[in-house]
Amino acid sequence: MELTWIAIIASLVMGIGALLIFIFAVKQDYFRNLEETKYQVFWSDLEELVESSVEDHRNGEEGQRND
């Protein structure tokens, strides 16, 4: 029976801890704009793709001029 009470108290402490962390995150505006983060990752990947494409295109033009 003692082990049951320890398990109940431990689960309550963990639940209260999770609730406090959630409240802290909300007050610090960690959940302000979740969509923006998704698009930041998308646009950074897209910029890398465009930059590599432009470099490939420039290297192709230089090769044609030298021929």
Image (cartoon, grey):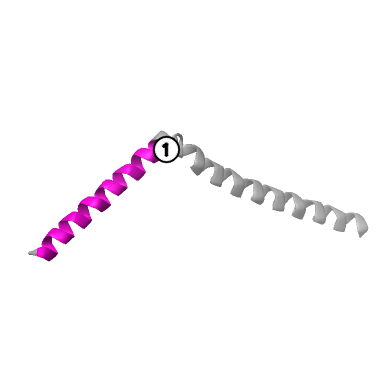
Task: Give how far across and how far down residue 56 sits, in percent.
Answer: 75, 55
Q: Which of the pair 3/27 is nearer the observer?
A: 3
- Tell which residue pokes out farthest to the right in this image: 66
Numbered range of the magenta stretch:
2-26
Answer whether residue 41 is magenta in the image: no
Task: Give how far across and how far down residue 43 sits, in percent.
Answer: 59, 43
Q: Which of the pair 26/67 is nearer the observer?
A: 26
Horizontal side of residue 62 vs 12, given as left or right: right
Task: Give how far across and how far down residue 11 sits, in percent.
Answer: 21, 55
Horizontal side of residue 48 vs 23, given as left or right: right
- Tell which residue pokes out farthest to the left in this image: 1
Task: Give how far across and how far down residue 35 sits, in percent.
Answer: 46, 38
Q: Residue at x 92, y 58 (%)?
A: 66
Three-letter code for the amino acid on which mark 1 is drawn: Phe
Q: Residue at x 84, y 52 (%)?
A: 61
Horizontal side of residue 28 vs 49, given as left or right: left
Q: Report the quarter where the C terminus lies.
A: bottom right
Residue 31 placement: quadrant: top left
Residue pointed to by mark 1: 31
Q: Is residue 38 above or below residue 64?
A: above
SS majority, magenta: helix
Q: Residue at x 25, y 49 (%)?
A: 15
Q: Name the element at disc 1.
A: loop
